[in-house]
């Protein structure tokens, strides 16, 4: 049986499809977005009237392969990843991810898993390996099987900036002043963040806290820790929400990592831990009737956190945690491009002194280290910014921790010094992170464990996209070029 047919026929799915129909009727849904995630983290897909839900649930939709690379063209005029002669993928909706859009309650949204075309001459109906979201699910399942049910939970800290528009619609500075943790500046963004939180709760994001960060208009809202795929879906949903709120307020929701020099960039620190067991717990968040499937309003709670200390030192991770940390440190240089994915990402790493990582090391609450032991039982991975694709990054973290556990890698002692004050003396002690996209691509390509996070065609699509992005940047004459070299002679 084709993998696409096995996916459609999996036990219990028919009942979920019927439950979505009930939600469609109950909520008055007229239209549905069938969406998936591109290599750069964009939301792609198709829309269709809700009348056709059952047909889409069984047969899915078809779309050109190149849509996983945003259907963008490279410097040579070729479509990135796949040309116009390539086959069409099949997107099959996952009914448990169905939820209503709160800003237009006539519309619903559902995530999809991607497959090769049913009529493809090779591996017909097989999982489409350029599907970053589907890859994460499968890599996570492999990890669970290899480690006796051990699974990854994550929580993200998505910093981003709300910017004003000028009359031409271009950025005109931050919506607030760059004062970190100042309630007055947080208050100035109240209409924006309250609208964001309202939409978030209606789509299953349990927002637990927020603050004003230290760049113009920079805001961070956090939601509850959960299973890694659902957390990545929530980050994607949060970005979708912010884009809508920006439209409503005629401002810009900016996920560019570093729009301003000599001010903090927008990171997306990713907190992780490995668990065994746990139970699904419903969190309706005051929504009655529930505007979507229960899966979207649930959390994985309880179980055993294997990162918790198992010695008298409350700061020292347990054995599995240390081995996992060892894997992260071993592969941090190779993984960097999965968390710092574009040219602008490395402006954050190069502008010293703003708490971004520089070396592959770790420390207790040391915000200058590459990985911070942020609390007992939890690591904060710091080489990641607001433009990341969370599915690619999570797959990379799983592969690195898998290698660390299997090889029982020692992460070395924690580094407690301010790294920015000791850069020169540390250069022979630690591996330096890449400081440009080109260097990041090269480091990734030299790390077989990091590369394994992008199986099959995903690797080729990613490398085509990123190498082309780097080439385009190198070939572009910028304002800096003009200012620096226009009057260089005579």
Image (cartoon, rainbow, N blue to C red):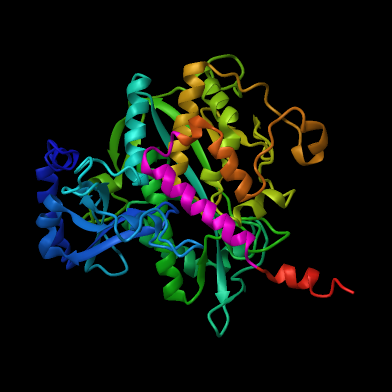
Q: Is residue 9 visible?
A: yes
Name the quadrant containing residue 482.
Answer: bottom right
Question: For this view, does 155 lie left or right of residue 162?
Answer: left
Q: Is residue 472 magenta?
A: yes
Residue 342 or residue 235, whichever sits in front: 342
Q: Quadrant of the C terminus?
A: bottom right
Residue 96 or residue 410, whichever sits in front: 410
Q: Which residue is found at the position 10% from the left and 44% from the top?
A: 15
Q: Position of residue 174 (x, y in %)?
A: 61, 69
Q: Is residue 308 visible?
A: no
Question: For this view, does 60 lie left or right of residue 332?
Answer: left
Q: Looking at the picture, does residue 404 appear above or below residue 174?
A: above
Q: Quadrant of the N terminus?
A: top left
- From which residue to which does the magenta span run? 452-476
Q: Looking at the picture, does residue 41 appear above or below residue 439?
A: below
Q: Which residue is found at the position 48% from the left and 77% from the top?
A: 250
Q: Is residue 264 magenta?
A: no
Q: Position of residue 207 (x, y in %)?
A: 43, 51
Q: Which residue is found at the position 82% from the left and 36% from the top?
A: 424
Q: Which residue is found at the position 51% from the left and 74% from the top?
A: 251
Q: Position of residue 164 (x, y in %)?
A: 57, 74
Q: Position of residue 43 (x, y in %)?
A: 36, 58
Q: Looking at the picture, does residue 377 appear above or below residue 237?
A: above
């Amino acid at each position: 049986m084709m993998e696409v047919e096995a996916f459609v026929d999996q036990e219990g799915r028919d009942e979920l499809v019927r439950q979505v129909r009930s939600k469609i009727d109950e909520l008055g849904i007229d239209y549905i977005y069938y969406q998936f995630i591109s290599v750069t983290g964009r939301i792609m897909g198709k829309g269709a009237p809700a009348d056709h839900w059952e047909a889409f649930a069984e047969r899915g939709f078809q779309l050109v392969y190149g849509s996983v690379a945003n259907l963008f063209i490279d410097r040579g005029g070729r479509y990135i990843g796949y040309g116009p002669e390539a086959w069409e993928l099949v997107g099959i909706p996952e009914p448990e991810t169905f939820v209503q859009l709160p800003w237009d309650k006539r519309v619903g949204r559902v995530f999809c898993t991607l497959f090769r075309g049913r009529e493809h001459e090779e591996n017909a109906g097989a999982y489409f390996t350029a599907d970053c979201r589907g890859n994460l699910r499968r890599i996570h399942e492999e990890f669970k099987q290899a480690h006796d049910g051990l699974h990854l939970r994550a929580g993200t800290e998505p910093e981003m900036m709300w910017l004003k528009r000028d009359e031409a619609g271009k950025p005109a500075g931050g919506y607030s002043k760059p004062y970190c943790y100042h309630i007055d500046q947080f208050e100035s963004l109240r209409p924006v963040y309250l609208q964001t939180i309202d939409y978030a709760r209606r789509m299953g994001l349990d927002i637990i806290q927020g603050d004003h960060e230290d760049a113009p208009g920079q805001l961070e809202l956090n939601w509850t820790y959960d299973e890694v795929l659902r957390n990545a879906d929530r980050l994607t949903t949060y970005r979708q929400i912010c884009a809508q709120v920006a439209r409503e307020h005629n401002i810009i929701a900016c996920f560019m990592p570093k729009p301003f020099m000599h001010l903090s960039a927008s990171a997306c620190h990713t907190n992780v831990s490995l668990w065994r067991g746990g139970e699904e717990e419903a969190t309706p968040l005051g929504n009655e009737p529930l505007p979507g499937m229960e899966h979207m309003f649930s959390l994985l709670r309880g179980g055993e956190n294997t990162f918790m200390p198992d010695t008298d030192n409350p700061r020292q991770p347990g054995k599995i945690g240390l081995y996992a940390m060892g894997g992260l440190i071993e592969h941090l240089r190779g993984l960097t491009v999965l968390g710092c994915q574009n040219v602008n990402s490395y402006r954050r790493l190069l502008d010293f002194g703003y708490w971004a990582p520089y070396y592959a090391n770790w420390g207790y609450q040391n915000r200058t280290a590459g990985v911070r032991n942020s609390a007992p039982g939890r690591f904060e991975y710091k080489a990641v910014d607001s433009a990341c694709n969370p599915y690619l990054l999570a797959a990379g973290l799983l592969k690195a921790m898998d290698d660390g556990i299997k090889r029982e890698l020692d992460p070395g002692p924690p580094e407690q010094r301010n790294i920015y004050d000791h850069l020169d003396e540390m250069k022979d002690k630690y591996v330096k992170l890449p400081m440009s996209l080109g260097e990041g691509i090269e480091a990734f390509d030299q790390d077989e464990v990091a590369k394994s996070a992008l199986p099959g065609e995903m690797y080729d699509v990613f490398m085509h996209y990123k190498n082309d992005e780097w080439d385009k940047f190198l070939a572009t004459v910028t304002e800096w070029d003009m200012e620096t070299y226009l009057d260089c002679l005579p």
